[in-house]
Amino acid sequence: MKRAFEEHLVQKFPYSCPYCNHTISYDQFDLKVGENEIKCPSCKKIYIKVVAPSFTEGDHRSRR
């Protein structure tokens, strides 16, 4: 018998710059699946934000 799995969010941490720890909202950026260059508005350093494909969109096949 197969059971459906449910996802539960336990705690959500705010996103922050890996260099200066400044809290960043990604709503202002047009993030796409893959690598995205983000420039911190506080320290002006650039880092990479990786966005994985969502299981709720598109391909629902098993990823092994």
Image (cartoon, rainbow, N blue to C red):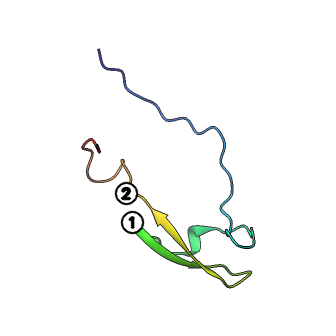
* 9 vs 14: above or below: above
| Residue at x 65% of width, y 61% of height | 15
- Alpha-carbon span between mark 1 and mark 2: 6 Å
Q: Could you tell me which secondary element the residue under label 2 belongs to?
A: loop
Q: Quadrant of residue 4?
A: top left
Instruction: Say whether residue 53 is left or right of residue 7.
Output: left
Q: Which mark is residue 33?
A: 1
Q: Could you tell me which secondary element the residue under label 1 belongs to?
A: loop
Image location (x, y in percent) of residue 21: 74, 67
Instruction: Say whether residue 16 is left or right of residue 28.
Output: right
Residue reaching furthest top? 1
Image location (x, y in percent) of residue 44: 68, 85
Q: Give, as a three-letter code, the residue at label 1.
A: Val
Instruction: Say whether residue 34 is left or right of residue 46.
Output: left
Image location (x, y in percent) of residue 27: 57, 69
Q: Quadrant of residue 63?
A: top left
Neighbor class of circle 2 (other Cα within 10 Å; few <14, some 14-19, many 20+) is few
Could you tell which of marks 1 and 2 lies nearer the N-terminus? 1
Q: Give, as a three-letter code, the residue at label 2.
A: Pro
Image location (x, y in percent) of residue 16: 68, 65
Between 16 and 29, the one nearer to me in the picture: 16
Between 30 and 53, the one nearer to me in the picture: 53
Q: Which mark is residue 53?
A: 2
* 17 vs 59: above or below: below
Whether label 1 touches label 2, CB < 8 Å: yes
The quadrant in which the N terminus is found is top left
User: Visible in this render: residue 32?
Assistant: no
Neighbor class of circle 1 (other Cα within 10 Å; few <14, some 14-19, many 20+) is few
Q: Quadrant of residue 38?
A: bottom right
